[in-house]
Image: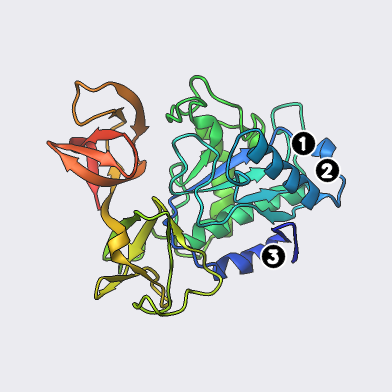
Amino acid sequence: METKSGFTKMTIQEFETWIKTQKVARTIFTIQEHHTFRPDYSNFKGNNHFEMQAGMKSHHMSNNHWSDIGQHFSTFPDGSILTGRSLESTPACIIGQNSNDICIENIGFFDKNKDVMTSAQKDTIVRMTAALCSRFNLPVNTNSIVYHHWFDMNTGERNNGTRNNKSCPGSDFFGGNKVQDCINNFLPLVSGVLTGTPVTNAPASVKKYVSVRADQLNVRVKPDPKSDKVSGNGPALMGAILRVYNEVNGWYKISASSEHWVMGKFTVDVKPATVNADTLNIRTGPGKSFSKSGSYLKGQEIFIEKEENGWCKINLEDKWVSKDFLSFK
């Protein structure tokens, strides 16, 4: 591994070991696949990984006015991986769809007749996606692994590529950017890496889920405000969904395997739910009289912070959906 300019460069073998050691308070439901479009293969010189990553960060902050580089990881033509923004931070990648996601930017322009992905980068993308599924207990399906192409580029509404969509991650990304292309060509490769590795939706010992309501919520080694902060673990950020495994005197244990604690008074309880209708309209308020602002598709997972007259409000968003079309865990 090599660290420079705040980024860490690693091989896929190093990543597979490294990701197992990362303590992430935020609940992860989805892995996003993207291509950069620009920069593309013509910009890669074989040894300028850090310069390219720094350039993307500068563009994202100066032109897009984001707080940091948009993605959590970038993959390169030689198979290398560079870290981006903190895993505790929500990515800036698909409008309205980032809350519980990890974003991967794959360097290249992977539309038909453009960059031809190298075998090294292909191997890294497949194995990296598999490693993230394993680390965050995600099933290998098209709700857990998504392409940017499946979402309206202005509203973030998922429409599976039927209107107003970018081609990202490329019309020739592992044989195509449609949902069926992912099912036919990409998911079997990810599943092949995970053969023999059990993957579940969430550990059975989770007592409840909470949403952070402070700008930054420190994670400590004991349920005590005077105890040390967890080493190597940044604070949980506003809106992050945390799993709670135990409660002691108003403190929540947010790791199944480690002593990681947060003060419960800076969180609110939320309920995980899955959309069970083919299409579920999103409204701006709790009722059909409120205007439609988008929709969810069957199988999408959301967190509910409030219920009112049979309508449910999405965590930290002005989005309401009918409770009749949700399955609660």
Q: Are marks 1 and 2 in contact (CB under 8 Å)?
A: yes
The vertical placement of 248 against 175, above or below, is below
The vertical placement of 29 against 150, above or below, is below
| Tally of numbered discs | 3
Q: Name which residue lies at 77% across and 34% down.
A: 115
Determine which residue is flagged by label 1: 40
Query: Disc 1 on helix, strand or loop?
Result: loop
The vertical placement of 187 against 223, above or below, is above
Name the front one of labels 2 and 3: 2
- Residue type, numbered disc 1: Asp
- Residue type, numbered disc 2: Phe
Determine which residue is flagged by label 2: 44
Determine which residue is flagged by label 3: 13
Q: Name which residue lies at 61% across and 32% down.
A: 168
> What's the distance in space between the residues labelled 2 and 3, CA to CA?
22 Å
Q: Are marks 1 and 3 in contact (CB under 8 Å)?
A: no
Indicate the position of residue 184 as horizontal and vertical percent values: 55, 39
Query: Disc 3 on helix, strand or loop?
Result: helix
Name the front one of labels 1 and 3: 1
Q: Name which residue lies at 69% across and 60% down.
A: 12
Q: Earlier in the sequence, mark 1 or mark 3?
A: 3
Q: Are marks 2 and 3 in contact (CB under 8 Å)?
A: no
Indicate the position of residue 151 as horizontal and vertical percent values: 48, 30
Classify residue 301 as left or right of residue 175: left
The quarter of the rendered structure image containing the N terminus is: bottom right
